[in-house]
Image: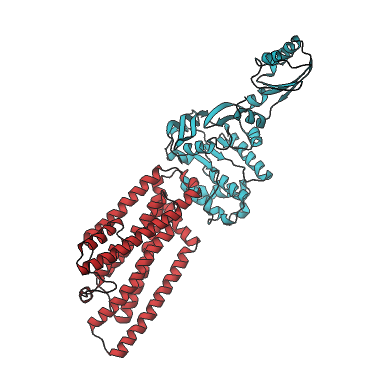
Chain colours: A red, B cyan
Amino acid sequence: MRLGIIAKLTVREAQRRRLLWVALGLGAAFIALFSVGFHFVHQEIITQHGMVSRAETQVFANFFLTAGLYVINFLSVMMAVLTSVGTLSGEISSHTIQSLAAKPIRRWEILLGKWVGYAGMLAAYMAGLSSGILLVVYLISGYAPENWLGTIGFLVLEGWVVLTVSILGGTFLSTIANGVLALMLYGIAFVGGWVEQIGSLMGSEAAINIGIITSLLLPSEALWRRAAYLMQPALIRSLPANPFGTASVPSPAMVVYAGLYVLALLGAALWIFARRDL
Amino acid sequence: MTGAAGGGAAIETHHLRKEYGEKAAVADLTLQVEQGEVFGFLGPNGAGKTTAVKMLLGLTAPTAGTAQLLGRPLGDAAIRARIGFLPEHFRFHEWLQAAEFLDLHGQLFGLAAEKRAQRIPELLDLVGLTDAAGRRLSTFSKGMLQRVGLAQALLPEPDLVFLDEPTSGLDPLGRRLVRDIIHQLKAAGTTVFLNSHLLSEVEVTCDRVAFIKDGQVVRTASLGALVEGMTEVVLRVGRVTPELLDGLRRWSGDLRADGRNVTLTIDDEEVLPALARWVVDQGVGLYALAPQQLSLEELFVRVVEGQA
Protein backbone atom coordinates (compact mmCIF):
# COMPACT_ATOMS: atom_id res chain seq x y z
CA MET A 1 0.00 0.00 0.00
CA ARG A 2 1.60 3.25 -1.14
CA LEU A 3 -0.15 5.20 1.63
CA GLY A 4 2.06 3.30 4.09
CA ILE A 5 5.20 4.25 2.11
CA ILE A 6 4.34 7.95 2.47
CA ALA A 7 3.46 7.55 6.18
CA LYS A 8 6.82 5.87 6.83
CA LEU A 9 8.58 8.56 4.79
CA THR A 10 6.92 11.23 6.98
CA VAL A 11 8.14 9.57 10.17
CA ARG A 12 11.59 9.04 8.72
CA GLU A 13 11.78 12.71 7.73
CA ALA A 14 10.95 13.77 11.31
CA GLN A 15 13.66 11.42 12.50
CA ARG A 16 16.29 12.59 9.97
CA ARG A 17 15.60 16.25 10.51
CA ARG A 18 16.10 15.60 14.25
CA LEU A 19 12.58 16.84 14.96
CA LEU A 20 11.72 13.56 16.67
CA TRP A 21 14.84 13.60 18.85
CA VAL A 22 14.46 17.24 19.87
CA ALA A 23 10.81 16.66 20.75
CA LEU A 24 11.58 13.48 22.71
CA GLY A 25 14.51 15.12 24.52
CA LEU A 26 12.54 18.18 25.51
CA GLY A 27 9.54 16.01 26.42
CA ALA A 28 11.74 13.99 28.76
CA ALA A 29 13.11 17.24 30.22
CA PHE A 30 9.55 18.47 30.76
CA ILE A 31 8.56 15.29 32.62
CA ALA A 32 11.75 15.46 34.71
CA LEU A 33 11.08 19.11 35.62
CA PHE A 34 7.47 18.31 36.45
CA SER A 35 8.59 15.38 38.65
CA VAL A 36 11.05 17.49 40.60
CA GLY A 37 8.56 20.34 41.04
CA PHE A 38 5.73 18.04 42.08
CA HIS A 39 7.99 16.09 44.46
CA PHE A 40 9.14 19.21 46.33
CA VAL A 41 5.68 20.78 46.49
CA HIS A 42 4.25 17.49 47.76
CA GLN A 43 7.02 17.23 50.39
CA GLU A 44 6.41 20.82 51.48
CA ILE A 45 2.71 20.25 51.97
CA ILE A 46 3.34 17.15 54.08
CA THR A 47 6.02 18.99 56.08
CA GLN A 48 3.77 21.97 56.77
CA HIS A 49 0.49 20.17 57.31
CA GLY A 50 1.55 16.70 58.35
CA MET A 51 -0.59 13.94 56.92
CA VAL A 52 -3.07 15.25 54.36
CA SER A 53 -6.46 13.72 53.73
CA ARG A 54 -7.30 11.85 50.58
CA ALA A 55 -9.61 14.64 49.46
CA GLU A 56 -6.91 17.27 49.99
CA THR A 57 -4.39 15.16 48.07
CA GLN A 58 -6.91 14.84 45.25
CA VAL A 59 -7.39 18.60 45.00
CA PHE A 60 -3.72 19.48 45.19
CA ALA A 61 -2.49 16.67 42.91
CA ASN A 62 -5.29 17.22 40.41
CA PHE A 63 -4.53 20.92 40.23
CA PHE A 64 -0.85 20.21 39.59
CA LEU A 65 -1.68 17.48 37.09
CA THR A 66 -4.12 19.71 35.22
CA ALA A 67 -1.45 22.41 35.00
CA GLY A 68 0.95 19.85 33.50
CA LEU A 69 -1.66 18.59 31.05
CA TYR A 70 -2.49 22.17 30.11
CA VAL A 71 1.11 22.60 28.99
CA ILE A 72 0.88 19.33 27.05
CA ASN A 73 -2.36 20.54 25.49
CA PHE A 74 -0.53 23.67 24.28
CA LEU A 75 2.42 21.59 23.07
CA SER A 76 0.03 19.32 21.19
CA VAL A 77 -1.29 22.29 19.22
CA MET A 78 2.17 23.73 18.54
CA MET A 79 3.58 20.36 17.51
CA ALA A 80 0.64 19.71 15.20
CA VAL A 81 1.10 23.04 13.43
CA LEU A 82 4.88 23.38 13.37
CA THR A 83 5.57 19.87 12.11
CA SER A 84 2.97 19.73 9.37
CA VAL A 85 2.54 23.30 8.20
CA GLY A 86 4.89 22.99 5.22
CA THR A 87 4.49 19.32 4.41
CA LEU A 88 2.29 19.92 1.37
CA SER A 89 2.75 23.60 0.55
CA GLY A 90 6.54 23.35 0.96
CA GLU A 91 6.81 20.31 -1.29
CA ILE A 92 4.53 21.90 -3.87
CA SER A 93 6.44 25.20 -3.98
CA SER A 94 9.83 23.43 -4.13
CA HIS A 95 8.49 21.02 -6.80
CA THR A 96 9.62 18.04 -4.67
CA ILE A 97 6.09 16.68 -4.93
CA GLN A 98 6.38 16.28 -8.72
CA SER A 99 8.63 13.24 -8.67
CA LEU A 100 6.28 11.57 -6.14
CA ALA A 101 2.98 12.44 -7.80
CA ALA A 102 4.20 11.28 -11.22
CA LYS A 103 4.50 7.75 -9.82
CA PRO A 104 1.67 5.19 -9.80
CA ILE A 105 0.28 6.65 -6.58
CA ARG A 106 -3.01 8.43 -6.09
CA ARG A 107 -3.09 11.93 -4.71
CA TRP A 108 -5.26 10.79 -1.80
CA GLU A 109 -2.59 8.25 -0.85
CA ILE A 110 0.02 11.02 -0.64
CA LEU A 111 -2.16 13.26 1.51
CA LEU A 112 -3.55 10.54 3.77
CA GLY A 113 -0.09 8.99 4.10
CA LYS A 114 1.25 12.27 5.41
CA TRP A 115 -1.72 12.73 7.74
CA VAL A 116 -1.35 9.19 9.13
CA GLY A 117 2.40 9.73 9.66
CA TYR A 118 1.93 12.98 11.57
CA ALA A 119 -1.20 11.81 13.42
CA GLY A 120 0.62 8.67 14.58
CA MET A 121 3.65 10.61 15.80
CA LEU A 122 1.45 13.19 17.49
CA ALA A 123 -0.67 10.54 19.22
CA ALA A 124 2.40 8.68 20.46
CA TYR A 125 4.01 11.89 21.68
CA MET A 126 0.90 13.16 23.46
CA ALA A 127 0.20 9.75 24.99
CA GLY A 128 3.82 9.47 26.12
CA LEU A 129 3.95 12.92 27.73
CA SER A 130 0.52 12.63 29.37
CA SER A 131 1.20 9.11 30.67
CA GLY A 132 4.54 10.33 31.96
CA ILE A 133 3.12 13.03 34.21
CA LEU A 134 0.15 10.86 35.24
CA LEU A 135 2.62 8.22 36.35
CA VAL A 136 4.77 10.77 38.19
CA VAL A 137 1.75 12.10 40.10
CA TYR A 138 0.61 8.57 40.95
CA LEU A 139 4.05 7.42 42.14
CA ILE A 140 4.60 10.48 44.31
CA SER A 141 1.12 11.07 45.72
CA GLY A 142 -0.73 7.85 44.99
CA TYR A 143 -3.37 9.86 43.09
CA ALA A 144 -4.75 8.73 39.77
CA PRO A 145 -7.60 10.78 38.30
CA GLU A 146 -10.75 9.23 36.94
CA ASN A 147 -11.12 9.07 33.19
CA TRP A 148 -7.39 9.58 32.61
CA LEU A 149 -7.52 7.46 29.48
CA GLY A 150 -10.32 9.61 28.07
CA THR A 151 -8.30 12.71 28.91
CA ILE A 152 -5.36 11.44 26.87
CA GLY A 153 -7.76 10.56 24.07
CA PHE A 154 -9.18 14.09 24.00
CA LEU A 155 -5.69 15.61 23.96
CA VAL A 156 -4.79 13.41 21.00
CA LEU A 157 -8.03 14.32 19.24
CA GLU A 158 -7.28 18.01 19.86
CA GLY A 159 -3.88 17.56 18.19
CA TRP A 160 -5.55 15.82 15.24
CA VAL A 161 -8.06 18.66 14.87
CA VAL A 162 -5.27 21.24 14.54
CA LEU A 163 -3.17 18.89 12.37
CA THR A 164 -6.07 18.47 9.95
CA VAL A 165 -6.57 22.24 9.72
CA SER A 166 -2.88 22.58 8.88
CA ILE A 167 -3.01 19.78 6.27
CA LEU A 168 -6.11 21.33 4.66
CA GLY A 169 -4.47 24.78 4.59
CA GLY A 170 -1.39 23.26 2.95
CA THR A 171 -3.44 22.17 -0.05
CA PHE A 172 -4.15 25.75 -1.14
CA LEU A 173 -2.07 28.19 0.95
CA SER A 174 1.61 29.02 1.16
CA THR A 175 3.49 27.68 4.18
CA ILE A 176 3.50 31.02 6.00
CA ALA A 177 -0.16 31.77 5.31
CA ASN A 178 -1.06 28.26 6.44
CA GLY A 179 0.86 28.66 9.72
CA VAL A 180 -0.83 31.99 10.38
CA LEU A 181 -4.27 30.50 9.61
CA ALA A 182 -3.82 27.52 11.97
CA LEU A 183 -2.37 29.53 14.86
CA MET A 184 -4.89 32.36 14.50
CA LEU A 185 -7.75 29.89 14.49
CA TYR A 186 -6.32 28.33 17.64
CA GLY A 187 -5.98 31.80 19.20
CA ILE A 188 -9.60 32.60 18.36
CA ALA A 189 -10.80 29.29 19.83
CA PHE A 190 -8.66 29.89 22.93
CA VAL A 191 -10.06 33.35 23.57
CA GLY A 192 -13.55 32.13 22.70
CA GLY A 193 -13.20 29.41 25.34
CA TRP A 194 -12.35 31.95 28.03
CA VAL A 195 -15.17 34.25 26.94
CA GLU A 196 -17.52 31.28 27.30
CA GLN A 197 -16.16 30.48 30.78
CA ILE A 198 -16.50 34.02 32.03
CA GLY A 199 -19.87 34.39 30.34
CA SER A 200 -21.06 31.26 32.09
CA LEU A 201 -19.98 32.57 35.51
CA MET A 202 -21.68 35.90 34.84
CA GLY A 203 -24.75 34.35 33.25
CA SER A 204 -24.19 36.07 29.90
CA GLU A 205 -25.95 34.12 27.18
CA ALA A 206 -24.24 36.15 24.44
CA ALA A 207 -20.74 35.40 25.78
CA ILE A 208 -21.59 31.68 26.01
CA ASN A 209 -22.79 31.71 22.40
CA ILE A 210 -19.58 33.40 21.27
CA GLY A 211 -17.64 30.57 22.91
CA ILE A 212 -19.80 27.95 21.23
CA ILE A 213 -19.38 29.58 17.83
CA THR A 214 -15.58 29.70 18.19
CA SER A 215 -15.65 26.05 19.27
CA LEU A 216 -17.53 25.20 16.08
CA LEU A 217 -14.87 27.10 14.12
CA LEU A 218 -12.09 25.09 15.79
CA PRO A 219 -13.09 22.66 18.56
CA SER A 220 -9.60 22.48 20.11
CA GLU A 221 -10.27 24.49 23.29
CA ALA A 222 -13.61 22.74 23.79
CA LEU A 223 -11.85 19.37 23.72
CA TRP A 224 -9.36 20.55 26.33
CA ARG A 225 -12.13 21.79 28.61
CA ARG A 226 -14.02 18.53 28.22
CA ALA A 227 -10.83 16.59 29.02
CA ALA A 228 -10.10 18.75 32.09
CA TYR A 229 -13.69 18.42 33.31
CA LEU A 230 -13.71 14.63 33.04
CA MET A 231 -10.49 14.39 35.01
CA GLN A 232 -11.44 16.74 37.84
CA PRO A 233 -12.88 15.43 41.11
CA ALA A 234 -16.29 16.72 42.18
CA LEU A 235 -14.77 19.14 44.70
CA ILE A 236 -12.81 21.03 42.02
CA ARG A 237 -15.75 20.97 39.64
CA SER A 238 -17.81 22.70 42.30
CA LEU A 239 -15.37 25.60 42.65
CA PRO A 240 -16.90 28.71 41.07
CA ALA A 241 -13.63 29.83 39.41
CA ASN A 242 -10.17 28.38 38.96
CA PRO A 243 -7.52 28.71 36.21
CA PHE A 244 -8.54 25.39 34.67
CA GLY A 245 -12.16 25.84 35.50
CA THR A 246 -14.98 24.24 33.65
CA ALA A 247 -17.81 26.58 34.41
CA SER A 248 -19.20 25.81 30.97
CA VAL A 249 -18.58 22.18 30.04
CA PRO A 250 -18.67 21.26 26.35
CA SER A 251 -21.20 18.49 25.80
CA PRO A 252 -20.41 15.01 24.45
CA ALA A 253 -21.97 16.25 21.22
CA MET A 254 -19.01 18.63 20.86
CA VAL A 255 -16.67 15.63 20.95
CA VAL A 256 -18.68 13.95 18.20
CA TYR A 257 -18.57 17.25 16.32
CA ALA A 258 -14.77 17.34 16.68
CA GLY A 259 -14.53 13.83 15.20
CA LEU A 260 -16.78 14.80 12.29
CA TYR A 261 -14.80 18.04 11.93
CA VAL A 262 -11.59 16.05 11.38
CA LEU A 263 -13.29 13.80 8.83
CA ALA A 264 -14.91 16.73 6.98
CA LEU A 265 -11.70 18.76 6.80
CA LEU A 266 -9.73 15.72 5.71
CA GLY A 267 -12.32 15.11 2.99
CA ALA A 268 -12.03 18.73 1.85
CA ALA A 269 -8.22 18.48 1.82
CA LEU A 270 -8.37 15.31 -0.30
CA TRP A 271 -10.83 16.94 -2.69
CA ILE A 272 -8.72 20.08 -3.17
CA PHE A 273 -5.40 18.25 -3.39
CA ALA A 274 -6.73 15.79 -5.97
CA ARG A 275 -7.71 18.68 -8.25
CA ARG A 276 -4.94 21.20 -7.84
CA ASP A 277 -2.08 21.65 -10.28
CA LEU A 278 1.32 20.58 -8.99
CA MET B 1 11.61 -2.17 -21.44
CA THR B 2 8.92 -3.95 -23.29
CA GLY B 3 7.32 -1.26 -25.43
CA ALA B 4 3.70 -0.22 -25.27
CA ALA B 5 1.35 -3.13 -24.96
CA GLY B 6 -0.80 -3.79 -27.99
CA GLY B 7 1.09 -1.45 -30.37
CA GLY B 8 -0.10 2.05 -31.21
CA ALA B 9 1.46 5.36 -30.32
CA ALA B 10 3.36 5.87 -27.08
CA ILE B 11 1.90 9.37 -26.75
CA GLU B 12 -1.13 10.72 -28.54
CA THR B 13 -2.69 14.10 -27.79
CA HIS B 14 -5.71 15.79 -29.36
CA HIS B 15 -6.22 19.52 -28.93
CA LEU B 16 -4.81 19.48 -25.41
CA ARG B 17 -5.22 22.87 -23.79
CA LYS B 18 -4.31 24.40 -20.46
CA GLU B 19 -5.45 27.80 -19.29
CA TYR B 20 -4.30 29.70 -16.22
CA GLY B 21 -6.88 32.42 -15.75
CA GLU B 22 -7.20 34.11 -19.11
CA LYS B 23 -3.79 32.99 -20.36
CA ALA B 24 -3.43 29.76 -22.33
CA ALA B 25 -0.11 28.13 -21.35
CA VAL B 26 -0.81 25.41 -23.90
CA ALA B 27 -3.24 26.53 -26.59
CA ASP B 28 -3.73 23.47 -28.77
CA LEU B 29 -1.38 20.51 -28.53
CA THR B 30 -1.95 17.77 -31.04
CA LEU B 31 0.89 15.35 -31.59
CA GLN B 32 1.74 11.71 -31.84
CA VAL B 33 4.93 10.04 -30.64
CA GLU B 34 5.54 6.53 -31.89
CA GLN B 35 6.83 3.70 -29.74
CA GLY B 36 10.57 3.42 -29.57
CA GLU B 37 11.35 6.85 -30.98
CA VAL B 38 13.32 9.62 -29.35
CA PHE B 39 11.16 12.69 -29.69
CA GLY B 40 12.47 16.21 -29.16
CA PHE B 41 10.08 18.85 -27.89
CA LEU B 42 11.53 22.26 -28.66
CA GLY B 43 10.42 25.77 -28.04
CA PRO B 44 11.43 29.06 -26.46
CA ASN B 45 10.95 29.81 -22.75
CA GLY B 46 7.29 30.11 -21.87
CA ALA B 47 6.15 28.21 -24.97
CA GLY B 48 4.30 25.67 -22.82
CA LYS B 49 6.71 22.71 -22.97
CA THR B 50 6.83 21.96 -19.25
CA THR B 51 3.08 22.52 -18.85
CA ALA B 52 2.51 20.02 -21.65
CA VAL B 53 4.70 17.43 -19.92
CA LYS B 54 2.94 18.06 -16.59
CA MET B 55 -0.44 17.50 -18.23
CA LEU B 56 0.74 14.22 -19.74
CA LEU B 57 2.00 13.04 -16.35
CA GLY B 58 -1.18 13.95 -14.47
CA LEU B 59 0.48 16.73 -12.47
CA THR B 60 -1.74 19.35 -14.08
CA ALA B 61 -5.27 18.83 -15.34
CA PRO B 62 -5.94 19.91 -18.95
CA THR B 63 -8.63 22.53 -19.49
CA ALA B 64 -9.67 20.78 -22.69
CA GLY B 65 -8.60 18.02 -25.04
CA THR B 66 -7.69 14.38 -24.64
CA ALA B 67 -4.53 12.33 -24.57
CA GLN B 68 -3.34 8.78 -24.23
CA LEU B 69 -0.07 7.39 -22.89
CA LEU B 70 0.83 3.84 -23.88
CA GLY B 71 -2.75 3.36 -25.00
CA ARG B 72 -4.32 4.45 -21.72
CA PRO B 73 -6.16 7.74 -21.05
CA LEU B 74 -4.60 10.47 -18.91
CA GLY B 75 -5.27 9.98 -15.21
CA ASP B 76 -4.67 6.22 -15.29
CA ALA B 77 -2.36 5.94 -12.28
CA ALA B 78 -1.44 2.30 -12.99
CA ILE B 79 0.18 3.12 -16.34
CA ARG B 80 2.63 5.40 -14.54
CA ALA B 81 4.41 2.27 -13.29
CA ARG B 82 5.77 2.06 -16.85
CA ILE B 83 6.68 5.71 -17.20
CA GLY B 84 9.85 7.41 -15.98
CA PHE B 85 10.09 11.15 -15.39
CA LEU B 86 12.99 13.45 -14.70
CA PRO B 87 11.48 16.80 -13.70
CA GLU B 88 12.93 20.12 -14.82
CA HIS B 89 13.22 21.19 -11.16
CA PHE B 90 15.12 18.18 -9.86
CA ARG B 91 14.28 18.83 -6.21
CA PHE B 92 14.00 15.72 -4.10
CA HIS B 93 13.88 14.77 -0.41
CA GLU B 94 17.41 15.91 0.26
CA TRP B 95 17.62 14.36 3.73
CA LEU B 96 17.64 10.90 2.09
CA GLN B 97 20.82 9.13 1.05
CA ALA B 98 21.11 8.39 -2.68
CA ALA B 99 20.42 4.66 -2.28
CA GLU B 100 17.51 5.33 0.11
CA PHE B 101 16.08 7.85 -2.36
CA LEU B 102 16.15 5.26 -5.15
CA ASP B 103 14.67 2.65 -2.83
CA LEU B 104 11.79 4.99 -1.95
CA HIS B 105 11.04 5.68 -5.61
CA GLY B 106 11.41 1.99 -6.42
CA GLN B 107 8.74 1.24 -3.80
CA LEU B 108 6.49 3.92 -5.29
CA PHE B 109 6.93 2.30 -8.71
CA GLY B 110 5.78 -0.94 -7.06
CA LEU B 111 9.08 -2.79 -7.57
CA ALA B 112 9.66 -5.82 -5.35
CA ALA B 113 12.53 -5.69 -2.84
CA GLU B 114 14.69 -8.10 -4.89
CA LYS B 115 14.19 -6.05 -8.03
CA ARG B 116 15.13 -2.85 -6.17
CA ALA B 117 18.21 -4.53 -4.74
CA GLN B 118 19.26 -5.40 -8.29
CA ARG B 119 18.34 -2.12 -10.02
CA ILE B 120 19.67 0.41 -7.50
CA PRO B 121 23.39 -0.54 -7.76
CA GLU B 122 23.00 -0.94 -11.53
CA LEU B 123 21.58 2.55 -11.94
CA LEU B 124 24.00 4.20 -9.51
CA ASP B 125 26.76 2.69 -11.62
CA LEU B 126 25.10 3.84 -14.85
CA VAL B 127 24.96 7.48 -13.69
CA GLY B 128 28.39 7.35 -12.08
CA LEU B 129 27.25 7.68 -8.46
CA THR B 130 28.25 4.31 -6.98
CA ASP B 131 30.66 5.96 -4.56
CA ALA B 132 27.97 8.41 -3.43
CA ALA B 133 25.31 5.75 -2.64
CA GLY B 134 25.51 6.43 1.10
CA ARG B 135 25.68 10.21 0.86
CA ARG B 136 22.74 12.44 1.59
CA LEU B 137 21.30 14.28 -1.40
CA SER B 138 21.73 17.55 0.54
CA THR B 139 25.48 17.19 -0.03
CA PHE B 140 25.08 16.63 -3.79
CA SER B 141 26.02 19.16 -6.47
CA LYS B 142 23.39 20.23 -9.00
CA GLY B 143 24.82 17.82 -11.56
CA MET B 144 24.80 14.90 -9.09
CA LEU B 145 21.15 15.62 -8.23
CA GLN B 146 20.29 15.55 -11.90
CA ARG B 147 22.11 12.23 -12.31
CA VAL B 148 20.33 10.62 -9.36
CA GLY B 149 17.05 12.05 -10.69
CA LEU B 150 17.75 10.37 -14.01
CA ALA B 151 18.44 7.10 -12.17
CA GLN B 152 15.05 7.25 -10.41
CA ALA B 153 13.33 7.82 -13.76
CA LEU B 154 14.89 4.61 -15.12
CA LEU B 155 14.14 2.41 -12.07
CA PRO B 156 11.23 0.39 -13.49
CA GLU B 157 12.88 -0.14 -16.92
CA PRO B 158 10.15 2.11 -18.32
CA ASP B 159 8.46 1.90 -21.70
CA LEU B 160 8.27 5.69 -21.88
CA VAL B 161 10.58 8.28 -20.33
CA PHE B 162 10.01 12.01 -20.03
CA LEU B 163 13.23 13.95 -19.65
CA ASP B 164 12.62 17.63 -18.95
CA GLU B 165 15.86 19.52 -19.57
CA PRO B 166 17.96 16.51 -18.53
CA THR B 167 21.34 18.15 -19.05
CA SER B 168 20.73 21.65 -17.67
CA GLY B 169 22.92 21.08 -14.59
CA LEU B 170 25.54 18.85 -16.17
CA ASP B 171 29.11 19.39 -17.29
CA PRO B 172 30.24 18.11 -20.74
CA LEU B 173 30.98 14.65 -19.31
CA GLY B 174 27.54 14.50 -17.75
CA ARG B 175 25.96 15.57 -21.02
CA ARG B 176 27.77 12.83 -22.87
CA LEU B 177 26.55 10.36 -20.23
CA VAL B 178 22.93 11.44 -20.76
CA ARG B 179 23.40 11.19 -24.53
CA ASP B 180 24.73 7.64 -24.15
CA ILE B 181 21.85 6.70 -21.85
CA ILE B 182 19.33 8.01 -24.39
CA HIS B 183 21.02 5.94 -27.10
CA GLN B 184 20.82 2.87 -24.82
CA LEU B 185 17.15 3.53 -24.13
CA LYS B 186 16.44 3.81 -27.83
CA ALA B 187 18.31 0.57 -28.51
CA ALA B 188 16.15 -1.13 -25.87
CA GLY B 189 12.95 0.13 -27.55
CA THR B 190 12.07 2.73 -24.94
CA THR B 191 10.24 5.84 -26.11
CA VAL B 192 11.98 9.01 -24.97
CA PHE B 193 10.24 12.37 -24.83
CA LEU B 194 13.04 14.91 -24.58
CA ASN B 195 12.28 18.46 -23.59
CA SER B 196 15.48 20.42 -24.05
CA HIS B 197 16.97 23.78 -24.88
CA LEU B 198 20.30 22.24 -25.78
CA LEU B 199 19.80 21.77 -29.48
CA SER B 200 23.18 20.14 -29.96
CA GLU B 201 21.92 17.32 -27.68
CA VAL B 202 18.66 17.09 -29.59
CA GLU B 203 20.50 16.99 -32.90
CA VAL B 204 22.48 13.89 -31.95
CA THR B 205 19.77 11.98 -30.07
CA CYS B 206 16.33 12.64 -31.55
CA ASP B 207 14.53 10.89 -34.38
CA ARG B 208 11.83 13.52 -34.68
CA VAL B 209 11.19 16.93 -33.24
CA ALA B 210 8.22 19.19 -32.66
CA PHE B 211 8.57 22.95 -32.40
CA ILE B 212 6.14 24.56 -30.00
CA LYS B 213 5.41 28.26 -29.92
CA ASP B 214 2.77 30.11 -27.93
CA GLY B 215 1.38 26.80 -26.75
CA GLN B 216 0.93 25.30 -30.21
CA VAL B 217 2.93 22.86 -32.28
CA VAL B 218 4.06 24.87 -35.28
CA ARG B 219 6.08 22.18 -36.98
CA THR B 220 6.78 18.47 -36.52
CA ALA B 221 9.29 16.64 -38.66
CA SER B 222 11.87 13.92 -38.80
CA LEU B 223 15.12 15.50 -37.67
CA GLY B 224 17.12 14.07 -40.56
CA ALA B 225 14.75 15.37 -43.22
CA LEU B 226 14.44 18.70 -41.46
CA VAL B 227 18.13 19.42 -41.13
CA GLU B 228 19.14 17.94 -44.47
CA GLY B 229 16.27 19.55 -46.34
CA MET B 230 16.50 23.11 -45.09
CA THR B 231 19.24 24.92 -46.96
CA GLU B 232 20.26 28.53 -46.87
CA VAL B 233 21.49 29.94 -50.22
CA VAL B 234 23.48 33.15 -50.63
CA LEU B 235 23.31 34.62 -54.13
CA ARG B 236 25.78 37.31 -55.19
CA VAL B 237 24.40 39.22 -58.15
CA GLY B 238 25.42 42.22 -60.26
CA ARG B 239 22.48 44.31 -59.08
CA VAL B 240 19.44 43.69 -56.89
CA THR B 241 16.20 44.84 -58.50
CA PRO B 242 12.64 44.78 -57.13
CA GLU B 243 11.71 42.44 -60.00
CA LEU B 244 14.46 40.04 -58.96
CA LEU B 245 13.29 39.98 -55.33
CA ASP B 246 9.65 39.49 -56.38
CA GLY B 247 10.67 36.63 -58.61
CA LEU B 248 12.81 34.97 -55.93
CA ARG B 249 9.86 34.96 -53.54
CA ARG B 250 8.31 32.09 -55.48
CA TRP B 251 11.36 30.01 -54.51
CA SER B 252 11.34 31.03 -50.85
CA GLY B 253 9.26 33.07 -48.42
CA ASP B 254 12.36 33.65 -46.29
CA LEU B 255 14.34 36.23 -48.21
CA ARG B 256 16.83 38.95 -47.20
CA ALA B 257 18.75 41.39 -49.39
CA ASP B 258 21.98 43.01 -48.24
CA GLY B 259 23.89 45.06 -50.83
CA ARG B 260 24.51 42.75 -53.79
CA ASN B 261 23.78 39.65 -51.70
CA VAL B 262 20.42 37.95 -51.46
CA THR B 263 19.94 35.22 -48.86
CA LEU B 264 17.05 32.79 -49.10
CA THR B 265 16.06 29.50 -47.44
CA ILE B 266 14.84 26.59 -49.54
CA ASP B 267 13.29 23.24 -48.53
CA ASP B 268 14.96 21.14 -51.19
CA GLU B 269 18.46 21.36 -52.71
CA GLU B 270 17.13 19.85 -55.94
CA VAL B 271 15.76 23.25 -56.97
CA LEU B 272 19.22 24.88 -57.03
CA PRO B 273 20.02 24.32 -60.77
CA ALA B 274 16.64 25.73 -61.79
CA LEU B 275 17.09 28.66 -59.43
CA ALA B 276 20.52 29.45 -60.90
CA ARG B 277 19.14 29.32 -64.46
CA TRP B 278 16.27 31.65 -63.52
CA VAL B 279 18.61 34.24 -61.98
CA VAL B 280 20.90 34.16 -65.03
CA ASP B 281 17.85 34.57 -67.29
CA GLN B 282 16.94 37.78 -65.42
CA GLY B 283 20.11 39.39 -66.78
CA VAL B 284 21.28 40.71 -63.40
CA GLY B 285 24.56 38.75 -63.41
CA LEU B 286 25.16 35.80 -61.07
CA TYR B 287 28.61 35.94 -59.48
CA ALA B 288 28.16 33.33 -56.75
CA LEU B 289 25.62 30.81 -55.47
CA ALA B 290 26.61 29.35 -52.08
CA PRO B 291 24.30 26.78 -50.47
CA GLN B 292 24.83 25.79 -46.84
CA GLN B 293 22.83 23.47 -44.58
CA LEU B 294 21.11 25.04 -41.58
CA SER B 295 21.96 23.85 -38.11
CA LEU B 296 19.09 22.88 -35.84
CA GLU B 297 19.77 26.02 -33.86
CA GLU B 298 19.33 28.24 -36.92
CA LEU B 299 16.25 26.30 -37.85
CA PHE B 300 14.89 26.67 -34.31
CA VAL B 301 15.35 30.44 -34.45
CA ARG B 302 13.62 30.66 -37.82
CA VAL B 303 10.72 28.44 -36.79
CA VAL B 304 10.01 30.29 -33.55
CA GLU B 305 10.40 33.63 -35.29
CA GLY B 306 7.94 32.46 -37.92
CA GLN B 307 10.36 32.58 -40.84
CA ALA B 308 10.36 28.90 -41.70
Residue at the top extreme, as displayed: B281
* Quarter the C terminus of chain B occupies: top right
> Observer-nearest residue: A113 or B169?
B169
Residue B125 is left or right of residue B74, and the answer is: right
Q: Percent position (x, y) of residue A11?
A: 44, 58
Q: Position of residue A226 (x, y in %)?
A: 26, 65
Q: Quadrant of residue A126?
A: bottom left
Residue B249, relative to residue B12: is it above or below? above
Q: Quadrant of residue B97?
A: bottom right
Using the image as rendered, state which of residue B162 and residue A76 is in the foreground: A76
- Residue B119, compared with residue B162, is above or below; it is below
Q: Is residue A134 left or right of residue B99?
A: left
Q: Is residue B278 above or below residue B206?
A: above
**How many tags in the picture?**
0
Residue A75 pos. (x, y %): 38, 66
Res. B139 visible in picture: yes
* Left-right relation of B40 to A270: right
